[in-house]
Amino acid sequence: MRAETRRQLKQDAFSRVTIRAAENTAHWTVEHRSTLLIAGIAVVVILAVGLGGWYYLSTQDEKASLEFSQAVRTMNTPLRPAGVPAQPDSPSFASPKERSDAAKKQFQTIVDKYPHTRTSDMARYFLGVTAADTGDNSAAERDFRDVASSGNRELASVAKLALASLYGNSKRTKEAVEIYQQLMAKPTASASKVTAQFQLAELYQASNQPVDAKRIYEQIKKDNPSGEAEQLATQKLSELK
């Protein structure tokens, strides 16, 4: 019963974060600085839920996964309005930075306590997310690069998406383009070719390279003659005119 309760707690937390992230990342938009990072969160969380017993491979990983669930809950804790005092029976944070700092400590604890678990890789990815959220791009880059070089191919590809987004937002366009091209050449379930294409095209738009953006959108339409991807590519092309 205790094991089943823990499993349910994790699934509940994962579900809430996934729904929230999916709402924020609809239509692959990159209009806000943290959108791509949140998109990465959604993908990672969905993968975690789908793999089911992934966190139960060992006693250490089971312990780490419970703490990971608690850290994810922290990231999803609501913010209270300015001037409103904290309520003992209703967890909240006064600012996004306060929330990110609290989650960061929890994820770092997992990395330190369970360094050889798969959950540790997940926690390190989220360390990169919290670092980027608080403007610490150097730390975010380090964490994303570490995860991108890990043995977990699916998680590594999500980290590469986040790293490319970080580079794009930091005006390191060439490095971002290289990563997107790598992902397009070798897509994964968590980082599909069309996802990398859209994000690369958005980067070209933001970098005042409309011709390159148009080329990518036209290729998306060609590769996906029907469905949401084709519709969105058509919309993006109309915005370039």
Image (cartoon, rainbow, N blue to C red):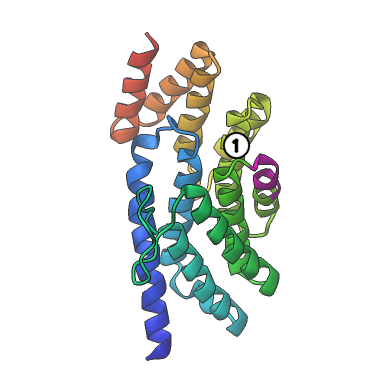
Rendered position, 85 above or below 132: below
Rendered position, 110 above or below 139: below
Left or right: 160 in relation to 86? right
Where's the C terminus, which quadrant? top left
Where's residue 167, x and y in %? 63, 33
| 33, 181: nearer the viewer | 33
Q: Main secondary structure of the magenta part?
A: helix
Where's the N terminus, which quadrant? bottom left
Kind of residue at disc 1: Leu
Rendering quarter of residue 171: top right
Residue at (64% x, 46% y) in the render: 140
Left or right: 142 in relation to 193? right
Residue at (42% x, 81% y) in the render: 6
Please state the extent of the stretch shown in magenta in the rendering: 136-142
Look at mark 1 in the image and give the residue it sits on. Answer: 166
Q: Is residue 190 visible?
A: no
Residue at (46% x, 67% y) in the render: 51
Q: In terms of secondary structure, where does tag 1 sit?
A: helix
